[in-house]
């Protein structure tokens, strides 16, 4: 991740690597054997051609046949639609931008698609396994028009012109494809398939090692149709399967005057645009040779009203319908205003109310009365939170003016019942200024939308721009923030006291600082049994305060003492607020308090339901501060429970003290984020007597070379002994002691070095893949990049600086000797690897594995291979490293790489295995977390 960030922050893309003369493909761009999966086509196989100068029926038949059999075709004689020479000017303009000075390009670089325009390298840079060798200008031309002034001036007029001309071509091609299927020529255009348009202008810089990377990985286009103009460099390949089922890659060689057309996933899908699977969306791959530029406008589906199209239950139709609904900007209320008599498909939930029965008569949510003496009120609140997670709060009138919640709910209703045009002016999903009005926060992700519209206002930790709140309900919403916060303060105090804590504990832990108000409006529903107001969920915060009107619909899931679960109606109680415990409070209370599922059902009332809730969360000081206030009162299991899949990692990372920081206060269990499911079950341990081989540097060179080559070939690992001529006696002991000394410094001293930026080539962190791995590993790391660029050694912690710098020099001497042995063992010149610059790229990682209370639940390092040429390892006497070995009978097992006094551990990396055409195997290794 640090390398990706460093590359991205140059803001000059792949071109920025080439400009200074990079001679090898950096590791982040290397693809494992990128061109081996499918053979190339035999001589004479070529992509079909469609000629627009043919009579329309013949051109339609040719296009339909090519779409059906190939999914790709060349389009020629389109000159009536595109001015002569235009695509050449377009490609030259894109090239001109990409070959501007780096500082000029960098001013345009970013990933926000601000104004509909962006320039970047690899849209999936932080998600893909390996980056691709290209830079991109992306312009979204529809359905919303971009700010064309943001397009770089050097290619602006050409890109804008290409949008118009390519759209004309797309219209003609879509007509041919429709006619070839016996549909009206304008069927796709009528289905709005020319309205969603994204243009990407790719630039593929010259590549020093084209066999190691790719321009674009194999993929299909997730759109309706793609129109491609490419220069004469070539590189595009199309995967074709012939009638005999044989598959191969076909070069889509540049043809002067031709455009390349390809069918997208949406046009192929039998359930999306055209009934049946008549067209084929082919895989495409770009192999790199030199510079390759290809601007590609993409037409993507928006909606599909035609009766001839497939069922609206299809996923692609659903996406179109959802988008169309959202773009009305009037929410569910807008459907009701139009007189809808059935619930639209996108709102239909399969059997929404069948999963759990309703409660028997007489079961009701408990009540907490604020007029009771404080100890009694605290006891009641704690009991309700413990047994139910929900309660009614009554007699809070000293905190909220009489009649205020009625005025609040009436104001929210008034806004939602304004004319559609007035509401639409506020509609959006950007939370601009901390305020927005929308329908369904998860509209584009959920399986079925819910029957509600929402005003959302962020009141903390950053204050919303109150002027953005609709005027019809502004004063009431702002007032509700103040009054509800007073209620929340009182309720939090009761809940703290119910646990034997000081009443202000939660407030001091910033739990009143993060505040989001949501005002829900549930319009009258024609078929309440087919949809939901809100699906079952728990609230992910600390506490929720809810005011609801008299319509009802809220239900709470309760499990009684016999283990029976049912839904309980939280019926409106005049003068009562509804309070519920959030996930974070359950975690902080060590499960003493419950965060329970609740939902909102639709009913047959002829009046819309209105509610307003405020969700309270920790503020800017975050969850760790919250836990630090509670820590002395609760056992360490609380610290393993953080609020969500993202925040729990972030909260750990922001301590800046690593795994050691968990151990220092005496953690007694392994926190959840470090737990690996059955980490040691996949492969058995080696039987007694199986050991990693030893290579002795004191042997005559030919014998040592034979031993190293044999160990590299059969094991991929070996101990190296008698290396004392290369490493001063006792040096590795001093190195390891210095690394230990740093990791055992006070937390505040270590925290000053913690980070993930590799600033100056030096970093200290826990788990380089913390935010990507399924489970974190039990280790902290100092990382220093010694080559090809030298680090700022002053950034290395002083307590271990001289040892780390010295180890770089000594380990490089060892690596030179070992590489020479491996080369000689393969009959190569001893300096073959050094001549190939294999000693120039150097990264040192110093791992520290703290004592672990439950070593069987986590790992030090997960099974992996090293993506390098060679690794030199010095380890202390604690042990834990294991190597996976497969014997001559094909049996695999883990072998302990036990510490051997005076020995270094050597292992072959992926690049060395590849370089010698797999004569040397690369084996996975892992580190179990030793206890003590």
Image (spheres, rainbow, N blue to C red):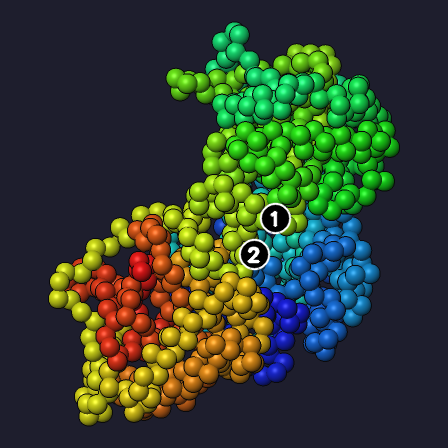
Secondary structure under the numbered disc 1 in the rendered image: helix
Q: Circle 1 is placed at which residue position? A: 622
> Residue at the location (57% across, 17% down)?
366
Q: Which mark is residue 614?
A: none
- Asked if one can make out residue 381 in the rendered structure from this viewpoint, the answer is no
Q: Position of residue 820 (x, y in %)?
A: 31, 88
Q: Please identify the residue farthest to the top as the structure is shown.
A: 361
Q: Which corner quadrant of the image does residue 228 belong to?
A: bottom right
Q: Circle 2 is placed at which residue position? A: 654
Residue 874 falls left or right of residue 492: left
Q: Position of residue 881 (x, y in %)?
A: 29, 65
Residue 436 falls left or right of residue 863: right
- Asked if one can make out residue 501 in the rendered structure from this viewpoint, the answer is yes
- Estimate how packed mark 1 is, as few (under 14), some (14 to 19) or many (20 or more) residues with alpha carbons within 10 Å: some
Image quarter hosting the C terminus: bottom left
**Residue placed most toward the observer, 120 or 755:** 755
Q: Position of residue 875 (x, y in %)?
A: 32, 72
**Residue placed most toward the observer, 103 or 841:** 841
Above or below — where is 542 with respect to 702?
A: above
Q: Which corner quadrant of the image does residue 810 belong to?
A: bottom left
Numbered circles on residues, count:
2
**Residue placed most toward the observer, 371 or 158:** 371
Residue 320 falls left or right of residue 692: right
């Amino acid at each position: 991740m640090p390398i990706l960030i460093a590359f991205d922050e140059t803001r000059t893309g792949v071109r920025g690597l080439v400009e200074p003369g990079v001679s090898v493909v950096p590791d982040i761009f290397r693809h494992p054997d990128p061109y081996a999966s499918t053979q190339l086509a035999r001589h004479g196989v070529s992509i079909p051609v469609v000629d627009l100068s043919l009579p329309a029926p013949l051109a339609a038949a040719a296009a339909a046949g090519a779409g059906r059999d190939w999914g790709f075709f060349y389009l020629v004689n389109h000159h009536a639609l595109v001015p002569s020479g235009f695509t050449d000017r377009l490609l030259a303009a894109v090239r001109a931008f990409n070959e501007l000075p780096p500082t000029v390009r960098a001013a345009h670089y970013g990933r926000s698609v601000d104004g509909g325009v962006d320039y970047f390298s690899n849209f999936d840079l932080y998600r893909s396994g390996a980056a691709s060798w290209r830079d991109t200008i992306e312009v979204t031309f529809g359905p919303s028009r971009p700010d064309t002034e943001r397009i770089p001036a050097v290619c602006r007029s050409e890109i804008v012109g290409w949008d118009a001309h390519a759209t004309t071509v797309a219209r003609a091609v879509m007509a041919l494809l429709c006619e070839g299927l016996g549909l009206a020529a304008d069927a796709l255009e009528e289905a709005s398939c020319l309205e969603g348009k994204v243009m990407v202008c790719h630039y593929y810089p010259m590549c020093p090692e084209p066999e190691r990377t790719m321009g674009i990985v194999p993929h299909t286009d997730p759109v309706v149709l793609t129109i491609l103009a490419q220069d004469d460099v070539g590189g595009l390949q199309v995967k074709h399967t012939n009638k005999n089922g044989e598959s191969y890659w076909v070069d889509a060689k540049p043809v002067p005057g031709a455009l390349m057309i390809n069918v997208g996933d949406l046009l192929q899908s039998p359930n999306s645009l055209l009934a049946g699977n008549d067209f084929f969306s082919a895989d495409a791959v770009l192999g790199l040779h030199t510079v390759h530029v290809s601007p590609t406008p993409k037409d993507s589906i928006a909606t599909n009203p035609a009766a001839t199209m497939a069922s609206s239950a299809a996923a692609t139709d659903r996406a179109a319908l959802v988008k169309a609904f959202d773009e009305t900007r009037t929410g569910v209320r807008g459907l009701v205003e139009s007189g809808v008599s059935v619930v639209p498909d996108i709102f239909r939930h399969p059997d929404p109310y069948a999963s759990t029965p309703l409660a028997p008569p007489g079961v009701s949510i408990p009540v907490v009365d604020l007029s009771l003496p404080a100890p009694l009120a605290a006891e009641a609140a704690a009991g309700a939170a413990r047994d139910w997670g929900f309660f009614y709060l009554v007699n809070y009138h000293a905190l909220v003016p009489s009649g205020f919640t009625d005025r609040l709910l009436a104001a929210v209703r008034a806004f939602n019942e304004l004319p559609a045009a007035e509401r639409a002016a506020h509609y959006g999903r950007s939370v601009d200024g901390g305020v927005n009005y929308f329908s369904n926060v998860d509209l584009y992700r959920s399986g079925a939308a819910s029957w509600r519209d929402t005003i959302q206002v962020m009141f903390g930790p950053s204050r919303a721009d109150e002027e953005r709140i609709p005027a019809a309900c502004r004063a009431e919403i702002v007032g509700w923030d103040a009054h509800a916060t007073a209620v929340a303060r009182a309720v939090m105090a009761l809940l703290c006291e119910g646990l034997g804590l000081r009443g202000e504990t939660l407030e001091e832990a910033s739990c009143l600082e993060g505040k989001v108000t949501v005002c829900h409006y549930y319009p009258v529903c024609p078929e309440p049994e087919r949809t939901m107001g809100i699906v079952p969920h728990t609230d992910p915060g600390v506490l929720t305060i809810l005011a609801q009107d008299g319509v009802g619909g809220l239900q709470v899931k309760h499990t009684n003492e016999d283990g029976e679960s049912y839904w309980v109606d939280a019926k409106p109680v005049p003068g009562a607020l509804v309070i519920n415990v959030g996930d974070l409070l359950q975690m902080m209370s060590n499960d003493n308090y419950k965060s329970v599922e609740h939902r909102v059902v639709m009913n047959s009332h002829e009046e819309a339901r209105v509610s307003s809730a405020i969700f309270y969360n920790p503020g800017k000081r975050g969850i760790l501060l919250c836990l630090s206030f509670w820590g002395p009162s609760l056992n360490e299991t609380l610290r393993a429970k953080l609020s969500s899949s993202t925040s729990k990692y972030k909260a750990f990372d922001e301590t800046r003290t690593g795994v050691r920081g968990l151990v220092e206060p005496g953690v007694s269990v392994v926190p959840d984020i470090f737990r690996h499911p059955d980490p040691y079950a996949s492969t058995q341990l080696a039987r007694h007597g199986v050991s990693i081989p030893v290579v002795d540097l004191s042997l005559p060179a030919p014998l040592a070379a034979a031993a190293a080559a044999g160990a590299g070939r059969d094991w991929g690992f070996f101990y190296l002994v008698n290396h004392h001529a290369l490493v001063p006696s006792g040096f590795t002991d001093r190195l390891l002691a210095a690394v230990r000394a740093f990791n055992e410094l006070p937390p505040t001293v270590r925290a000053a070095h913690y980070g993930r930026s590799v600033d100056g080539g030096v970093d200290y962190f826990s788990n380089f893949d913390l935010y990507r791995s399924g489970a974190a590993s039990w280790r902290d790391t100092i990382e220093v990049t010694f080559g090809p660029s030298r680090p700022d050694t002053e950034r290395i912690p002083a307590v271990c600086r001289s040892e780390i710098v010295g180890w770089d020099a000594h380990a490089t001497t060892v690596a030179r000797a070992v590489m020479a042995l491996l080369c000689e063992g393969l009959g190569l010149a001893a300096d073959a690897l050094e001549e190939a610059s294999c000693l120039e790229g150097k990264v040192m990682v110093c791992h520290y594995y703290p004592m672990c209370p439950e070593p069987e639940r986590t790992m030090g390092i997960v099974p992996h291979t090293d993506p390098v040429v060679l690794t030199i390892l010095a380890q202390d006497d604690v042990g834990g490293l294991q190597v996976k070995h497969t014997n001559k009978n094909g049996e695999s097992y883990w072998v302990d790489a036990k510490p051997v006094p005076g020995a270094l551990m050597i292992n072959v990396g992926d690049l060395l295995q590849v370089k010698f055409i797999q004569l040397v195997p690369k084996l996975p290794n892992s580190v179990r977390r030793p206890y003590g």
